[in-house]
Amino acid sequence: MTEKQKTGAGTGPSDTASHPTPSKRKTPARRRASAGAGKKRKAAPAGIGSETRGKVMVTGAAGALAQHVIALLKENYDVVGVEFRGLQTSYPDTVDYVVDFNTRPFEDVFREHGFTAIIHLGRIRFTQSTRGRRYSANVIGTARLLRLALKYGVEQVIALSTFHVYGADARNPSLIDEEYPMRAANLMREVVDAVELENLFNIYLYKHPELNIAILRPCHIAGPGINNEISRMLAQPVAPCLLGFSPLMQFIHVEDMAEAVLRAFERNRPGVYNVAPDDYVAYQDALQLAGCRRLFLPSVPPGLARRAVRALGRYAPPDYLINFFKYAVIIDGSLFARTFDFKPQRSLTELLGHYRGDK
Amino acid sequence: MRTRQFLKPRTVSREVDALVDALPKHNIGSQGYDPWGLNPDTAKITFTAVRWLYENYFRAQAYGLDNIPADGRLLIVGNHSGQLPMDGVMVSFAVANKAENARLPRSMIERWFPSVPFLGNWMNSVGGVIGDPKNCAKMLEREEAIVVFPEGIRGSGKPYRLRYQLQRFGHGFMHLAMEHNTPIVPVGVVGCEETMPSLVNIKPLARMLGLPYFPLAPLVPLPARVVINFGKPLRYANDARNERDVEWRVEEVKDAIRDLIDTGIAQRKSIF
């Protein structure tokens, strides 16, 4: 029995070819790799800044943002795309492995490749799966990812978080900076996994400086291919909004966000950074610019608003995110802009015009 | 957006349009909002309505407007009264309507306003900002003029029998002024106490509705005459050794405001 077979299913390209199982998903990249089954590749002595290109793991490789990031990275680096969500029915070419971070075969991906860096974009969103599953995948899975990164000498980690960790509240100041407490866990228990994920990265950031962790907290990411809560609202012909509330919002185009991830990766400045443009739009204005008709829901009392949102099902944001559609959460992206010399290239009009054009 | 587009051509005169356009504004983005939600178009519509209130309803008079510098960070600190923040509206309008070197001041508002439908968004769009020290610090760094009432709800919600008596001031404004090297312009507002005289605060009703107070008062503000006096700027170095020093400085500001209130009461010929 070879070493690969002992580790179990769903590990790497060579394993796929010799022992296919129904649970494993064959991606185009894996099919290509299966041609060279049995040949164990040795990791090149690569490193960031060295003459040899480094090898980078990108998690959440099936996502729209990851696809843009991988396209940018491929110009200068070897990229291995890993997808753990396992919810999609088809995978793009950017996915090399479909593996759960919490299973043993995940370590084989590290053994197989000598990663110099990890770009961790894979995270189960609030509307995907249950709280328990989200916690298990996002927090426990990422803890394992970081332990393996330490074990296999990874030099840099870029982590994608979200501005949701600040929480939406009527008392929020504007231009929230990175030092502001992550109040979301106190305000909405359903997003506790996002806050815990951040805490986990923060612990590793200070306890293991050799990992060079940079945590990015972007505002609403939108644009072609993105399927988060706000994108779904903008893509609908009729979008719900709460009567009497039109909070200020920030949007970043998926291509700009990919560029931001690339800059954070290439310039390697560990820390926590908000990522947001210096431009703002009210939610109801954004809906109109995106060509949506507004469906007004009652906003008071809060119980009635939640019931109305719940009744709309997938056409409305989940009721625990309702405060994000009620109160502004404006983040200050100036630290990121200064540190990485970053300025988004796509305007709000262009971004929202994409949704209008699709209708 | 559509409401604004409907109201603006029907209510805003060319004069007001040009006047608000000329006011220095910071960080207005491509969609017409700054990070705190200020929207010049909504400000123009509101400016038209407030102008009528200022000139015809409250017949307000402002003195000492020369003490407001043309630019740079500034804290305008005054006495609060009148159940509704009409004094903040009058002070802000007086500064924005100056003949020369007019500015668009931002008012610090109570933290519960954003949770009120329509009102919260409207207050943000005309320059109101939640009274949070972080907000205030960031705005001072951007060289804004800010109207602050350090009494907060202690001042606006007090009953009529305590009229023109300054309540306890918070110290936050003084710390901000010292840390950010910001001059303080004291302002005394006379008249707003009479706009909504409250006999008593109905606390159980306020608790039930989640409001800071529920006054037994007229349903609409009464047309009392308003007199506003701006004092000379006060400057404080960032060298306080302890909170006691800060308290003394706050008392100096309160004394300046008391003098301005007394001046205003003497200037006022009649209440209505």
Image: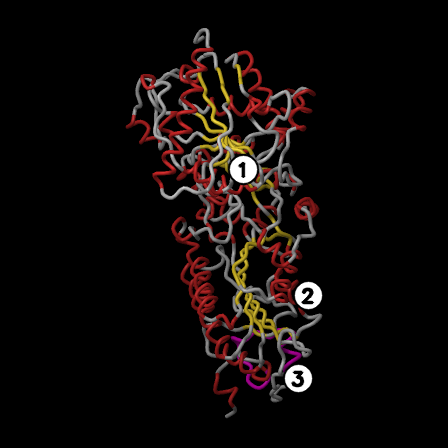
* Chain letter of disc 2 in the image: A
- State which tag comes first along the sequence, 1 or 2: 2
Q: Is residue A121 magenta?
A: no
User: Which residue is under mark 2?
Assistant: A72
Which mark lies nearer to you, 1 or 2?
2
* Viewer-closest of A26 and A73: A73
In the orientation shown, which residue stands out farthest toward the left?
Answer: B204
Q: Point out the stretch of residues depicted in magenta.
A: A17-36
Measuring from the top left, give residue B12's x and y in whole percent: 65, 21
User: Which quadrant would the C terminus of chain B be assigned to in this image?
Assistant: top left
The three-letter amino acid code for the residue at tag 2 is Leu
Q: Are marks 2 and 3 on the same chain?
A: yes
In the orientation shown, which residue stands out farthest toward the bottom?
Answer: A1
The three-letter amino acid code for the residue at tag 1 is Ser
Q: Are marks 1 and 2 on the same chain?
A: yes
User: Which residue is under mark 3?
Assistant: A35
User: Which residue is under mark 1?
Assistant: A246
